[in-house]
Image: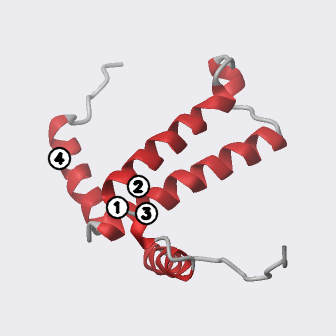
Amino acid sequence: MEKINIEYQYDNLTELTMGLRRFAEERQWQRFHSPKNLATALIVEAAELLEPFQWLSQGESTCLGPETKDQVALEIADVLIYLTRLADQLDIDMLTAVSKKMRLNAQKYPPKILSP
């Protein structure tokens, strides 16, 4: 297999969305990227994200070794890739959706003042 040396660097969600769209189009994967399939793949990747933490204590889970941290980073990337493709297919602006959700969360969960 020929090694392809392409730089994949994204500085914002728009660049990421366009880069992932282009990547899928170049491989003719659009037919596989239905919202249902992307949501399913997202759940599978989210489950894989849990695997490195499976038998760790709460404390151990906050102090990952370099190899485990790399593994977690790649699983987070998989989750973000599928989430971004899903949002793109459904024409959902993720930052707008997050802003709306945070406003709802702020109403639902107001800050509590702790007494001294």
Q: In which quarter of the image is the N terminus?
A: bottom right
Q: Where is residue 72 in the image (x, y as percent from the top left)?
A: 67, 43
On the image, which quarter does residue 2 sit in? bottom right
Judge depth for marks 4 and 2 and give the one in front: 2
* First-in-chain label (4 vs 1): 1
What's the CA distance linking mark 4 and mark 1? 29 Å
Label 4 vs label 2: CA separation?
Answer: 26 Å
The reply to whether the C-beta atoms of the residues labelled 4 and 3 are less than 8 Å apart is: no
Name the amino acid, label 4: Leu
| Residue 96 falls in image quadrant | bottom left
Where 108 sits versus 96, above or below? above
Q: Mark 3 points at which residue?
A: 32
How packed mark 1 is, by other alpha carbons closer than 10 Å (few <14, some 14-19, many 20 or more), is some
Return the residue at label 1.
34
Mark 1 belongs to which amino acid?
Ser
The residue nearer to you, when weighing 109 against 88, is 88
Q: Which coloring applies here?
A: secondary structure
Lower position in the chain sequence, tag 3 or tag 2:
3
Could you tell which of marks 4 and 2 lies nearer the N-terminus?
2
Which residue position is annotated with label 2?
38
The C terminus lies in which quarter of the figure? Answer: top left
Residue situated in front as seen by the camera: 22 or 12: 22
